[in-house]
Image: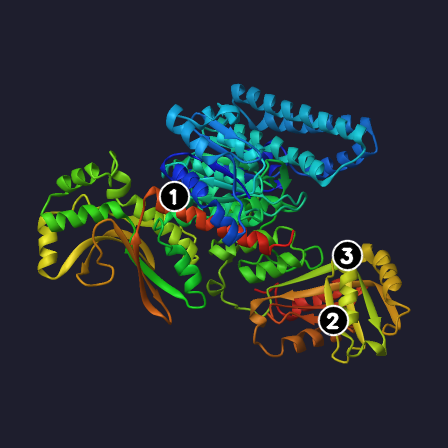
Amino acid sequence: MRIILVGFGVVGQSFAQLLAARSPDLLKNHGLRPRLVAVVDRGGAAVNSRGLEPLRTLAAKREKGSVAADGENGRPGLTPLEVIEKVGAEVVVEVTPTNIADAEPGITHIKAALKSGKHVITTNKGPLALAFPALMELADYNGVLLRFSGCVGGGTPILEFARRCLLGDRIMSFRGILNGTTNYILSQMTERGWSFQEALKGAQEAGYAEADPSMDVDGYDAACKLVIMANWILNRKAVLGDVKIEGIRGITQHAIKEALRRGRKIKLLASADGNLVVSPQEVPVGHPLCVDGVLNAVSFMSEYAGEETLIGRGAGGKETASAVLRDLILIRQSIAKIPV
Amino acid sequence: MKFGGTSLADGDCISRACGIVVDSLKGGNKLALVVSAMADVTDELVEACRSAEVGNRSFIRNTVVELRQLHESACRVSVTDKHLRNEVKKTVEESLKELENVLEGITYLKEVTPKIEDYVLSFGERLSAPIVWGALRSRGVDAEWFTGKEAGIVTDSNFGDAKPLMEMTVHQVKDRLQKLYEGGIVPVVAGFIAADQEGRITTLGRGGSDYTATILGCALAVDEVWFWTDVDGLMTTDPAVEPSAKTIRKLSYQEALEMAFFGAKALHPKAIELVMERGIPLRIRNTFNPQDPGTAIKADQEVEPSSVAKAISLIPKVAIITVSGAGMVGAPSVASKLFEVLGRKKVNVLMISQGSSEANISFAVPRESLDEVLNTLELSLLGGKYVREIKAEEDACIVALVGAGMQGTPGVAARIFSAVAREKINIRMIAQGSSELNISFVVKEAEGEKTVRALHREFNLGGK
């Protein structure tokens, strides 16, 4: 299967490493022989219709700053759109950074890939948060798949669990902690008695929070994931504008201590139950959702099976790359089922 | 608001339409406009395509000259600002040049594919929209004009009768028009035309401007969609047949859909379906009589079925074909074969009826397709062991009675048939949808109008 990889940051590089490391196993167990035919980053592209050597492309990136330096495969200045439209491939893996203002450049990449009849795997939450129903329609119309396991829960198969494991049951609502960074900050505030600012600084030093932490602490990251889950799991045609969002900047030590006195902890919860809401809520200590550190947790209320909670690490390059691989295997399986 | 072709027939009409827009804006409304091609322009373009196909260059030249005259004079009258007028004229001239080149190209290729035809037809709206834009700007209205493609309407690649990819369209239209619209700038969108995902021009089929209007209405989440046309609204029946026919004030979406299927030319069924899903009220109004409130089309519960029937339509020039044979009893393959043949020939079947004895199936088709249908059926069905005979009657017409009040009201059929019987008119074939929103039946062509009048009286539709 020929793959175009657009975006070569942490997730993209982890994915390339994963392909290199897992290729014998993928072939043996899944009948999947992935060929990375193009990798695109800001400096240009590396293209080889027979398949690049992932390790060599990784080395070019590491040593010379761009995949365009990958010897005879290098194509400096080639844009993602040109690659998506002109290079023959079955799948485009879109892992450029999330942008929730206008979802660019990811949304343009995804549209172009779907239009040219390529399956798409993305970990980019912006396009899905702003235009989930539209992109799904475009994928259906062109008879290809659009998958995004890596967008929610990283390596933890939250989306799959809801759609496949609870098949036949009906999920009525769900709520959960969808953002590891804010959970880390809130946990530190609770355990160490730090102020929000101190805890944020700690999280930045530990590498859990970005220099500009607003995506996380203002609740947008959780809201994006909520939108994706509402569409995918509840068939709700929602976009980011439909979510009521409140972040954690206003959480004080006083509020945390008050909650603890009543046996509760403050968590940033995303919930889909009628309305879509992201806001700090009190969760009883001992409740399955009450997890600490960078962990994520989601509880599904289903009509017959009742409440089920999934806990796992939310993010990280390797975890997310493994979710991309999971999507890739899934696409491979569904291609095999479609008679050509 | 959508303005139909007759509401934009010349410069004066365009000025009148702009007056309506200005008044509405003064009333504090936010507006988005959809405009059709000027009256008859689309038909002229279709004809130009046909002539180009057979290499008739002089006809093309004449068409372009006529179109230039029509649009320039409309521009002269309605675009009062001199500076704007020059700008609009330039746009119109560029489009006309392009049109002439395309038609010229067709004379060489001697072929008009649906894709090319869509491209040619798109010029109707591409010519009218900038004039309306200029006319609005001349009156101090802040406006911007768009083709359907620029507005973000994206469809499948079924040229000639394309369907929008609705979610993608909503996303793109919001992206491109919402800020303008919310900010009080009036987007003027060329109706009927759109583009597929590759950006090639498509059209939304007959009455496509209605469709454009409801698409925009849904994308911009408007409170109401208004169609401005040249009649006060939907009528109880054709006033040419029954002079006492009245404008219907209120209809449910379902009733409107039934009427659209029965040929109410002011309506596009797909357009109604869209607003129905989202519960956006639709209003049909008359540009030449803007005082009249027109016809309001709303959700079912808001429309009380005060009378049993709301409207009577007449579909003239119909033929009935009856396929019979004792062998057809209990042989479902005949029906499937029959409709497969009709489907392959793309015949529009207007009505179907089969008695439960199964010994015959009758159906109604437009008369112009009778000869072809009849011969095709004879070739494929006769000679087997099931079908003995295929008969046709060509002097028929369909009369349809529409109204939600018929639902669950016993005795409606009895009233219809006794009213018709009193006129000594023989009913040839009957069908009622199980929705009970309409009853349709076939009578002899010559008796069609008489039937309509009798029913109009019976149900007191001209009343008060």
Which disc is residue B56 wearing?
A: none
- The CA span between labels 3 and 1 is 46 Å
Front label number (3 vs 2): 3
| SS type, badge 2 | strand
Most distant residue in the bottom direction:
B357
Q: Position of residue A258 (x, y in %)?
A: 9, 56
Say how the picture is coloured. rainbow
Most distant residue in the right direction:
B383
Q: Are marks 3 and 2 in contact (CB under 8 Å)?
A: no
Residue, disc 1: A125
Q: Can residue B287 be seen in this snapshot?
A: no
Nearer to me, A111 or A66: A66
Residue, disc 2: B353
User: Are the residues under badges 3 and 2 in a single subunit?
Assistant: yes
- The CA span between labels 2 and 1 is 54 Å
Q: Position of residue B340 (x, y in %)?
A: 76, 62
User: Are the residues under badges 3 and 1 in a single subunit?
Assistant: no
First along the sequence among labels 3 and 2: 3
Nearer to me, A21 or A170: A21
